[in-house]
Image (tube, coloured by chain):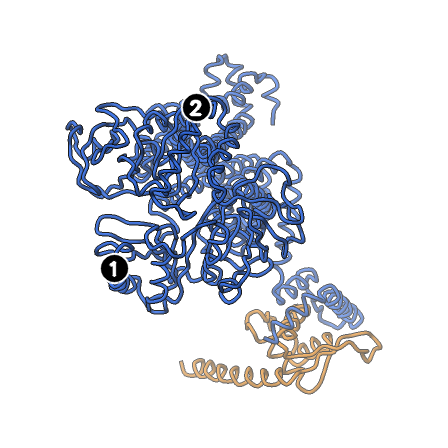
Amino acid sequence: MPKVGLDLVPGTLVMLILRVLQPGSMHGYAIAQRIRQLSGEVLLVEEGSLYPALQRMLLKGWVDARWGTSDTKRRVRFYTLTPAGRKQLATELAGYSHINEAIQTVIKFA
Amino acid sequence: MTELFRRIQYLLNRRRLERDLSEEMAGHREMMTEAKSGVDPVFGSQLRLIESSREVWGWCWLDRLFQDLRYGLRLLRKSPGFTLTAVLILALGIGVNLTAFRLLLLETTPTVRDPDSLVEVARWFPNGMGTTIAYPVLAFYSEHAHSFRSVIAAHEESVVFGETTSGYGTPGSAPENVMVNFVTATYFTDQAPPVASGRALAAALDETPRSEPVAILSQRFWERRLGSAPDILGQSLRLNGKSVRVVGILRNPREHHIDVWMAVAKQPLVVDGSKLLSDWTSASTHGTARLNPGVSVHAAEEESRALAAALRESHPEAVGKDERLSLTPFSSNRMHPQEVVAAAMAATLVMLILVVACANLGSLLLARGIARDREIRTRLALGASRVRVVRQMLTESTLLAAAGSLMAWLLSAVTLQVFLTEAGDSKDWSLALDWRVMASTVVVALLAVLVFGLAPALRLTGSAPRGGRARSVFLAAQVGASCVLLMISGQLVRSFGELLKLNPDFDYQKVLTISPKLHGHGYDDSNAKQYFAELHQRLSTVPGVEHACLTWLRVWGDTYSGFFDGGRNVRINRVDGDCIATLGLHLSRGRNFASYERDVALVSESFARWHWPGEDPIGKRLSVPVLATVVGVVTKAGTFDIQDANAMGVYYPLTLQDYSDATVVIRVAGVPGTLAGTLIGVAGSQDSKLRPVVSLLRTTYDNAVAQSRTRVAILGLLGLLATMLAAIGLAGLTGYTVSQRTREIGVRIALGADRPRVVRAVVRPLAFPVAAGMVSGMLIAGVISTVLRNNLSSLRPADPLAYFMAIGMFVFVIALAVSVPARRAVRIQPAEALRHE
């Protein structure tokens, strides 16, 4: 199965990060691993592209970042959803499933 | 809002946050290598990722700006000659504009509060106007007119100033004259700027019969005559020998010539025997009034018509038939239409200087840009976008403009201070910091950047970066504008130059006047006649006095009388029979009249031509303002208006009621200044009350000429500046062309081209734009000077000599500017040129 670059689905990366962070705070590497595992290694081509997206989310105030120590005793930055981030996730998910349904309908019945 | 806040927070902590990010990324990569899972995960270029993370925060433009600024500064520092020339050109171009703008602000900034409701009061008669009014009449209007909220009376009089009681001034020296404005307290509430220190006059304090006489000094008088004595408030001055206490200082009033203000109620105390406050007939007070809110000028004038009629019942001597007031708002008469046209023209010329400067810089930048062609191409080839390169070049232009306008700002501040100090004002730097001046500097500088920076930048980064056409346009614009400037300023210089030589057509050099102001001291007509008869006797014994005569209005004085004739103003004066000889006026036809004759008149040639065109005026009857037969014609009536020897004027014989206002005119043999003291003594010794004022016509004349001289100097400077700018631009441009074409010229020489051919090769590309610029410049100059001639009567009619002189000089300067680089071209050595890169 070919790998799909995230840039093919613009804006999705932010939504994925928000979703991955929903259960609790995570550092960048863990976010990347999580997306990679869950998507069956389809969705993340360049792990580094997380960071511009995270910066954008910091700017928007959807996540907070705090330095801490990882399980492997490494200094890492943990990202946590803010209330604004939760709201944003809800909006994006709703919007996404709406569009998805529409696309699915077209594909099935066209 | 919070997003903006986060952005700013990022900007402030940017260094730490970026370090955090790269540390985080590095950590991520380390973890990736440690994990080493089956598939090879890719991180991506850290540099690019950091770059795009940075872009998220939206501060990249700032980085690029700093980059551009640094680069621009480095480039400008690398070629100091170019930078200096450019900054100088810009400073001159912008500076001239700024100075003109500041002057305009200075002229038009209302010095009174609410100038729309403040009106100047004049008397209107069916056949004329009077600018002054008798004090009791004005007081009558003040009391009865409902249209006026307040009325300001101002009576100017020259009085003799002695030293202060504590010894300021120059003790022991001859007493000087100072101008005193005797005003009502309303002058300070409604017309004058607030006093700089001390207090203003107040009705309750200074206008009661028991209040002591106090004075407000002008700051200029305090600085120049009293040496800025710090403890002046509370001190006493001696005015006409009376002690007057100083209570305040007024800075930069509208009336620059006034030294001292006093309450008009105290005028009789200073001027012995004065009947100013009770005399209904002598119109010697200037009136100003503040209209009540909502009252129109027209309504106020109509009310005054009724009041004048009522006043005529009780004081028929005070008011003429059908007389009323004529009111002119201060807001309307700040500038005459003629002055507006003149100002617009001056503004156009001044803007042209900026155009020349911009075109000049534009072509310099273009030439320099062509030399930088390789650098620009390289940057474009390395992937810089055109916008980025244009922006970089504009940043350079902006740097130049910033430096130029800073210099311009200083330049104009200094020029203006010199100008104002020359004009006799106190120093006032507030104008330099005026927000309008600041704003206009910025706007002008930005415009300049657009004009001189954008076009070359676009041209140079375009696909065919030769800049040939742009250069031609710049060149033509520059030559054209310079040409206009030079021709107009040349013409104006010649016209004002005429004023420098203004020929009153009589020999004023050895004439002085003595005004004993008898009326002011309570003389009646027959007493006055008696006084002058005695004075005449005494004067004839003073050695050096050649002629003496009497005139009703002072020659070149500030009081006028006249009538309208077919819409034009005709000035009149009444003189005795000796005046033609004393003043040295020239009779061109007819005869002089004798002092005892009645109903006769002398007219000026200009009036005769206007009123009886093509006819012999001798024996003709004049009915306005009085019946008179013309007995003679004087070539010019230069005694009325110092600026206009061609003024239309009529002289009538002196009548009995003129004596109390009359002035003695004396022609002396030697130096007039040395006789002045003697003459004051002679005129004053007859009556100890009197304080005669002696003035030299030469002084009056010199002051008038000095004004014109300043204008000529300014205009001449503008013309010179234009020519210089054009020369610098052309020389620079030709120089660049030559160095750019060194190799080609070398080849030509090697192939046997002779000198004229080489010069032609260099000059030919310039020929068309220069010629086009000159032709259009001459056409535009022609149009402008036609407009000017229609609006400025003092401008001479079409002046081909001035035109040819300007063109000749311009061609000469251009030739000179081009010849230097052309000579360099001729001397090019073919062998070296071929190695030249």
Marking on residue B15? none
- At x 53%, y 25%, the residue is B738
Tint applied to chain B in the drawing: blue
Q: Residues within 10 Å of mark 1 (few under 14, many from 20)?
A: some
Badge 2: chain ID? B
Which amino acid, mark 1? Arg
Marking on residue B312? 1
- At x 31%, y 36%, the residue is B793
**Residue placed furthest toward the right:** A73
**How far apart are the alpha carbons under marks 2 and 1?**
66 Å
Q: Secondary structure at mark 2?
A: helix
Q: Nearer the viewer, residue B104 or B542?
A: B542
> What letter labels the chain drawn in orange?
A
- First reached walking from the N terminus: tag 2 or tag 1: 1
Q: Quadrant of the C terminus of chain B?
A: top right
What residue does disc 2 label? Answer: B809
Q: Position of residue B147 (x, y in %)?
A: 33, 67
| Placement of B465 over or under A43, stated as above or below | above
